[in-house]
Image (cartoon, rainbow, N blue to C red):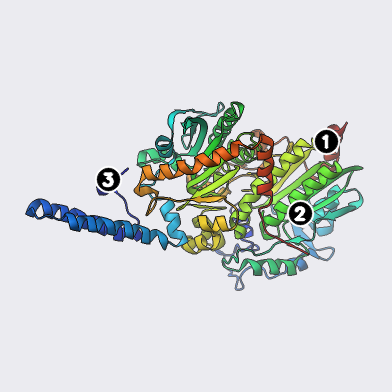
Amino acid sequence: MPTNANRQFLDFEKPVKDLIDEIENARTRQEKTKIDMTDLISRLEQNILEKRKEITENLTSWQRVQLSRHPDRPYTLKYIDKMTSNFVELYGDRNVKDDKAMVGGFTSLDGETVMIIGQQKGINTKMRQLRNFGMANPEGYRKALRLMKLAEKFNKPVITLIDTPGAYPGLEAEERGQGEAIARNIYEMIRLKVPVICVIIGEGASGGALGIGVGDKVFMMENTWYTVISPESCSSILWRSWEKKEVAAEQLRLTADKMLGFGLIDGIIPEPVGGAHWDYDGSAQILKNYLIPVLKELKQMSAEQRTNTRIEKFGRMGFWEEE
Amino acid sequence: MSKQVEDFDANLAGEEGKTEETKSSWFKRIKKGINTKTSEKKETPEGLWVKCPDCNYICTISELREHLFVCPKCAYHHRINSSEYFEVLFDNNEFIELFDNIRSKDFLDFTDLKPYKKRLEEIWSKTDLKDSMRVAEGKVNGQGLVIACMDFEFIGGSLGSVMGEKFSRAVDHCIAHGLPYMVISKSGGARMMESAFSLMQLAKTSGKLSQLSDAKLPYISLLTDPTFGGISASFGMLGDLNIAEPGALIGFAGPRVIKETIKRDLPEGFQRSEFLLDHGFLDFIVARKELKNKLATVLELFKN
């Protein structure tokens, strides 16, 4: 996790940055003047917590999108590292190559083996490029499917962590069938015999997210978004301008509370005060505590019960009028 | 090509051709867009001339209709609607339309440049269509088949809750009556005005296909110009047979988005049916004139 000095701040997080700067100042003054500032510092630290809480309580949809893309936010491998033990990463789709934007492997969660799969974003400029900004190619989706089938064979539950601005819209991606790869995953996931839990941990953009997002339970973390298109692209297509992303975010109703209200997800997983980027251990612990009982519950159902319930659940989604 | 892409975007946004070809010419168009209502356009009087967008060959509507809306000179496949496809495929144009009582609803109160509600009302008043997909049961050379066909003129053939529901009920109907299923796709992708609900139709329809598959009934996916986004990322690519009309643009991401992403020009023929066939994603390409007979042959092979 970044130290306070290395933290990055979004514009609406500036009040928190000011408080952190104040603490730094107090510390420097304390060193210089040898006057005890402990009281002031602890008061400021309390203020920071309150400010973090205040900020996340009053976010617009667009700010929530920004928070989901916070450069300090924990990504899939971070959660795997903090939440599980004995992770063995498995690479490649056995076909074309290994897609670095999609990671996965067997790991032990609370003493039980699970398959965890997710998109991975880079933590610095070089890694962001290597990870293709979390935008998987068809081989990424096919790798994910290979791992899910592996889990199914050995009767291990599947957990997917979703964080993608979309499937990669590239030339080679089209040549290798991006649409087919996502379609196949959706089709296979809905009938996978083992329990499947999906969690949006950052961005949940469209088919790129749904390509590993069909499960018995689908959860969103507090500061994430999930919908059919990114607010930027939606603005560009429907408003014919890149400037309407805030309005588009509002109109798309892409936040966790809206999605839960629509019945399109099964729950919201809280984050530490101010967002997951303030506390990696805390975020992972909350997620872990959330997942364990859900897994237990799902394991009690038969495979057939699970797949039927899954098909019925998605089958109910939609709204229309009948004359 | 670029005009086609712009038109495609316009259609995605639920608008009719907004491209101004006259932008750089001597003459300026004063009024924006074409004001002719689609309903009037459809009832073109006999003898009106049509220009092929590909080879500029000019012929009459009735001549084009005789050729199943395929250019007599260069075999360019004009975009047609569900009513034309039903006419091309069903014996004597006899079919029973199913689930035509379902129509879209603006559940989210979605407003972009126009409220979704208004957009729907406008199309309902302009056309006879209820939504972007029609389902019908009929016979193809004597063999029963359920066809779900998209209408591009209804918000770019976009996939929303209604299409998802009609698709699902069509699958149930096929299972109940032991009929094969065919979907004719022509769509810009998911309907953004229905937000995440439209995305979830990908999972909903895939779940139904899984049930159709368990019932061992054939599912044929015919992809026509254009088929993009959510369709190709779900049932469009999940056919027991994936087939396409010649020269159709088919892909996941739109050509403009890809071009902007990779910052170079796209190769000739990129995302066309022939390109997909070469890369292994289509079982075959079939010309509209041969479609009915080939389909009948396939259905027979599945059955006997």
Give the residue at mark 1: B298
- Tell me if residue A233 comes above or below residue B37 in the rendering: above
Which SS class for mark 2? loop
Give coordinates of residue B238: x percent, y percent: 69, 39
Residue type beneath disc 2? Ile
Q: Amino acid at mark 3?
A: Thr
Q: Which of the two discs, 3 and 1, sits closer to the camera? A: 3
Residue shown at the point (71%, 39%) measured from the top left? B210
Give neighbour class at mark 2: few <14, some 14-19, many 20+ (Cα, 10 Å).
some
Q: Chain of mark 1?
A: B
The label on residue A3 is 3
Is circle 3 on the same chain as circle 1? no
Image depth: mark 2 or mark 3 in front: 3
Q: Residue at x 74, y 50 (%)?
A: B167
Residue B236 shows in the view: no
Task: Give how far apart the Cα atoms at labels 2 and 3 are.
Answer: 61 Å
* Identity, as a three-letter code, of the amino acid under mark 1: Val
- What chain does badge 3 belong to? A
**Quarter placement of the N terminus of chain A:** top left
Examine the image and state in which quarter residue A209 appears.
top right
Q: Earlier in the sequence, mark 2 or mark 1?
A: 2
Label 3 Cα neighbours within 10 Å, binned few <14 / some 14-19 / many ≥20: few
Indicate the position of residue A127 as horizontal and vertical percent values: 38, 38
Q: Position of residue A99 (x, y in %)?
A: 49, 33
**Numbered badge on residue A241:** none
Mark 1, Cα crowd under 10 Å, few <14 / some 14-19 / many 20+, is some
Label 2: which residue? B80
Question: At numbered mark 1, what does the secondary structure look like: helix, strand or loop?
Answer: helix
